[in-house]
Image: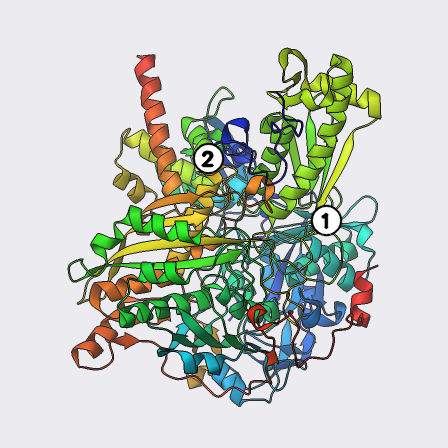
Amino acid sequence: MTQPKLPAESEKTAHIRITLNGEEVDVSFAPYKTLLEVIREDLGHTGTKHGCELGECGACAVILDGKPVLSCLVLAVECDGRKVETVEGLGSDGNLHPLQDAFADLGGAQCGYCTPAILLTAKALLDQNPSPSRDQIREALSGNLCRCTGYLQIFDAVEAAMIEISKRNTSAT
Amino acid sequence: MVDKSNPSNPAAGDSRAGADQLRVIGAPRRRVDARGKVTGQTVFADDIFLPRMAHCKLLRSPHPHARIRKIDASRALAHPGVYLVLTGKDLPIEYGILPVSQDETALCVDHVRHVGDPVAAVIAREELTAFEALDLIDVDYEILQTISDPEESLATPEPRIHDYGEEGNIHKRVSFEFGDADKGFAEADEVFEDLFFFQGNTHLPIEQHAAVAIKDREGKLTLWTSTQTPHYLHRALAKVLEMPTGHIRVIATPCGGGFGGKSDPFNHEIVVSKAALLLGRPVKICLTREEVFYCHRGRHPILMKFKTGVKKDGTITAMQLQSLIDGGGYGSYGVASTFYAGALQTTTYHVPRYRYQGCRVFTNKPPCGPKRGHGTPQPRFGQEIQIDKIAEKLKIDPAELRLRIAVKPNELTANFLQLGTVGLDQCIRRVVEISGWKEKFRKLPEGRGVGLACSCYLTGAGLSIYWNSMPHSGIQLKLDRGGGVTLFTGTTEIGQGSDDVLAAIVAEVLGIATNDIRVYSGDTDLGPVDLGSYSSRVTLMAGNAAIQAAERARAMLVEAVADKLQVPKERIRLADNCAFDSAAPEKRVTFQEAVCLGESRFGTIGTVGSYTPPKFPAAQYKGGGVGTSPTYTYSAAVVEVEVNPTTGWMSVVKIWNTHDLGRALNPVIARGQVEGSIYMGLGEALMEEQEFRRLPEKFSRALVHKFPSILEYKSPTSLDMPEIVTEFIEGPDARGPFGAKECGQGPLLPIIPAVANAVYDAVGVRIDEVPITPEKIVKALADKKAGKAPRFGPTHFPEVPWPEALRVPPPWEGGDGHATNEAPRRPKPRLEKERVLSS
């Protein structure tokens, strides 16, 4: 039995328009590609990583319409008209996001490969719940594997960022 | 009164340097590569996209053991979009990390040795096309008998997995006697014999191996790759591609997790290099996660038989260790692993007489190699549990027993390893204190328990992997008249913080901030040779080289500034981005002005530093070099667990650990390394297994990996990590830069046996096997209930044809480090293969 021939990667017959890190962007790609592949290969945003092809390691996490998702398990064609946030969009006006500062200062990143995904997952948590308990932080990050840190400095960094964000919100009001 | 030796800028390991004198070293600080990592700007190998880049995929053997009769790639070559297909005959020159086991080819020529062994490579316009074309390569295999474990390997001399080695499928045997162990057993009050088994496991870096090769504008090869050892890879490429080393540039991209899994020269690196040279376009490969399991080079499964004799007070009279080591399909670091699996048994507790026999065999599984701890976690597991059993029998508290038998600073061990500073005593006392050991041990309610274990690890392998008298680390510094400093080094940043450590050392000596230093590491064109990130060598070796390079630069600046300020040289201090008179600090110039003054006086300022470990005159016997190191670190850990006696389910409640690391150069990074080591030890103790199973008869009975995916190969998540209390025991060791020793591997070692000891304290069963899983605990509890031995573990050690032992009398028996039954060692003859390497 012959297998149906898949279009080549260069046959970019699918088109979507997404809001990527706050900017509207049009992108064309081969229709079977995942959001992860389109982000990395067709949009050139290589901050988001792959680690397992299975949706198990969490290194591909991005924020889709406010929720953290495993971009390797999302088809890009499903994302038309939706909002995508990647690590490249963290921070503003040339400054780092408090999570990025905290991770940098408190040892939240060693080899740095899992870091973008963990930052986004943590951001999605803090956007939903500005003062999570340590257990809630653990739970939220339980889908992100890290082989370097042992996680504890990551929790410390999320807690420190949480405090900093709340300070800034307080002084802003 | 000014101290003429200028204590304000401490030299290497100068323990007179008061902590308040140091500005950078010892301070918690954002590491120099942090910003790139938190912004996603750090470029890993697979993040590299170049114009006209082609993609490579490898066809791997589906058979665990077979001969290749024929490969027909014509259909693949004809497939639209395929540029090139390579097979073994295109890259026939053998290579391997160790000179004594150059047993790999980039693609198998006529013999495949495990499921996953690469046999062909497709290079195509698109990744998907390359994948598709793999199915179009026809390989005619002649299936050979599969050898699945060491017992089978010993019993099956033919078919030979390799044509070299000792005999049959035995790769390497070692046998040492340091003193008469039998005499020691005869003198003992009690003799303990135990069997332990440590299952294999793998590194599981989140970043899969990836490499991009190009033929650059000068027609030379550049290879970006995720590697821990660019220098050794550099040599292997020159050998296999038959190119001058100077025409090859290896750039170690930031490594997304190594742990020893990226320290061999790899098939895929050589293949893309060859393809890029043939095609004249960039070629990239990224391994799938399943392929990473086949690449492996992980923890050797080891079956161990321990025999220890002790006096009533716990003093060891003799120790004997026999190890049967499952090497997998290739040599990798295996010969070194075989020595390591016995070498460090004498460096933690005083062992007056020691016998070690190790046997590594080939099996048809992915090759084993170095994983964090390299061959020492397995025997450490066995020894720390046996000591627990000894303590129980002798009715001595396990911590107390260890204190009695701990080694002393600067001791020379029975196998002639020279110890440096030894903080083991403080480690044990402190961990006992902070964990509440005395109130908990044997006192917690049923189902809850504590276990204690200690360990020792080396700070850098004393010998290079290939014989030579050259430095192990080199650093070059360039001082710019604009005030910037650039550091060129061959070291590789694998997450352990080496870039930051080196920047911090230079910043401290020159009195500037790490943010004003640029580090270019891991590039064989830009930086001097560093042997690589393995054996915990970088901080000590490259760090000492950095001090030398920085001190040489400093000396020039000091002389020029002294002249300018008309002040004696000895009073010039470099700190806070300035150079000033320590007696009258208002007399100062900025660092930038100091550089300009220096450049005007001496010309362009560039300095070099290097480090070669001290010669180890002690261990003169063959194999004595493995285990030598400039110095050693010590760790002690207490683990508290809760075990459900019905389900066997165990949760780790809390871990306390102390680590004698000399000095924490950056406490944030040091804490991360210690906790990361503990995390990895916990993973191995509880859940990680590189396990294999035989397919049923109707599916060929082939030997396949049980869990080649991150889903099924379990590793701890954020939910599995307990609270960890870490204390550094800081007592500077003069051999290390600012007194620092290692902290990236040592803390892993005690965790695994501490968990096993804690389980015994909790529910009274011994799990003498790793991983310590619920099924094993339940089985042991059932046995205990039925009146059988309350233990789960190996019951049998096969007959091994041990060779005659090398007899080396220990120092206290008048030994001089030579074997009494070995011919005087001559310089090794240079083999034909090695001559190519030195060109």
Q: Chain of mark 2?
A: A
Residue lying at 36% horizontally and 36% vertically, measured from the top left: A156
Q: Nearer the viewer, residue B371 or B13?
A: B13
Q: Is residue B174 above or below residue B495?
A: below
Q: How many marks?
A: 2
Q: Which residue appears at 64% of the width and 61% of the height?
A: B266
Identify the disc placed on residue A86.
2
Q: Provide residue B744's location: percent of width, then percent of height.
A: 50, 50
Task: Tell me the element at label 2.
Answer: loop
Which residue is painted at 63% across and 75% down in the image?
B138
Q: Is residue B80 visible?
A: no
* Residue at which label 1 appears: B529
Q: Tell me whether circle 1 and circle 2 mark residues in contact (CB < 8 Å).
A: no
- Crowd around label 2: few <14 · some 14–19 · many ≥20 (10 Å): many
Residue A140: x %, y % from top left: 31, 42
| SS for dot 1 | loop
Q: Hey, what amino acid is under mark 2?
A: Thr
Which of the labelled discs sits on residue B295, or is there none?
none
In this orientation, does residue B506 appear?
yes
> For this rendering, which residue is in front, B685 or B40?
B685
